[in-house]
Every structure is written in C-alpha cells, then in structure tokens.
Amino acid sequence: MNNDTGDQSRPDRSHLVIDLMPDYITLQNPETGERYEIEVVQVWCDPHYPDAHKAPQFRRYVERRADEGKMVLVRFNSRDAITLLAPRWSADSQWHEKGG
C-alpha cells in the first residue's frame, strides 16, 4: 500500500486487509451529550483468525494511526466488528477492544 505498511505481512499471512477508503464513526460525550465524528481505518480480519489483530506489527500500525487521531475498526464480516483503541485513546494507557 505504502511505506507505512512495509512492516505488515501479506494478507494471506497476516489474515488482515487494510481498507484504503476512510470511514467515520460518531462518538458521544456521556457527560455533555456532544457528538463528534472521528476517522477510522477499516481493517477486514479473516473470521477464522479472530485474534490476528493482536499481532505486534499490526498493533504498531494501529498506534501510528492513533498518533494521527484515527481509530481502527476491525471487521470480521458485514455485521461483526470491534473498535480497537490504542493506548493513547484510553485513560489507563492500555489496549481496549470495544464491541463484538
């Protein structure tokens, strides 16, 4: 795709495909009710390898997207997905998976 994905394995080995088209999700502040859109990168994960998104090289890619203010949506099919939150997005500086 570009130099930023040079550390990623081919999709037939990583079981992940990074979608080139950006997408957006709407978040809502639970305290103020304010809603805002945030850009997400969609990544399609082979449902036979549901933990493929935990590979260290892919997590580094996700961290680089977080540094750009983007989140990653890992899709297993047209219905099932998780939002993968890099440590910079959480108060406890840990990885989080939302949805399922």
Image (cartoon, helix red, strand yellow):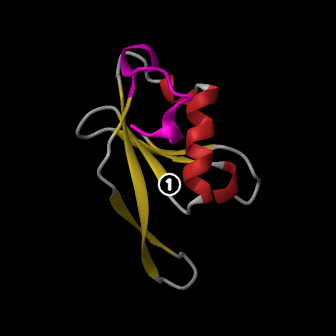
Q: Residue 36, position in %: x, y?
A: 43, 76
Secondary structure under the numbered disc 1 in the rendered image: strand
Q: Is residue 43 above or below residue 90?
A: above
Q: Which quarter of the figure has residue 42? A: top left
Quadrant containing the N terminus in the rendered view: top left
Residue 13 in magenta stretch: yes
Residue 8 in magenta stretch: yes
Tell me the residue at 42%/62% (across/down): 39
Tell which residue pokes out farthest to the right in this image: 92
Point out the stretch of residues depicted in magenta. Answer: 1-16
Q: Which quarter of the figure has residue 79? A: top left
**Depth check, front residue: 59 or 5:** 5
Circle count: 1
Q: Which quarter of the figure has residue 74? A: top left
Tell which residue pokes out farthest to the left in this image: 78
Per the image, the residue denoted by label 1 is 71
Quadrant containing the C terminus in the rendered view: top left
Q: The residue under label 1 is which amino acid type?
A: Met
**Depth check, front residue: 71 or 98:** 71
Q: Residue 12, position in %: x, y?
A: 36, 15
Q: Residue 10, position in %: x, y?
A: 42, 20
Please give left or right for residue 96 compared with residue 9 in the image.
right
Q: Residue 33, position in %: x, y?
A: 48, 82
Q: Is residue 76 above or below residue 19?
A: above
Category of crowding for the residue at label 1, using alpha-carbon neighbours closer than 10 angstroms: few (below 14), some (14–19), many (at least 20): many
Tell me the residue at 29%/51% (across/down): 21
Tell me the residue at 44%/40% (across/down): 2
Tell me the residue at 76%/54% (across/down): 92
Q: Is residue 44 above or below residue 28?
A: above
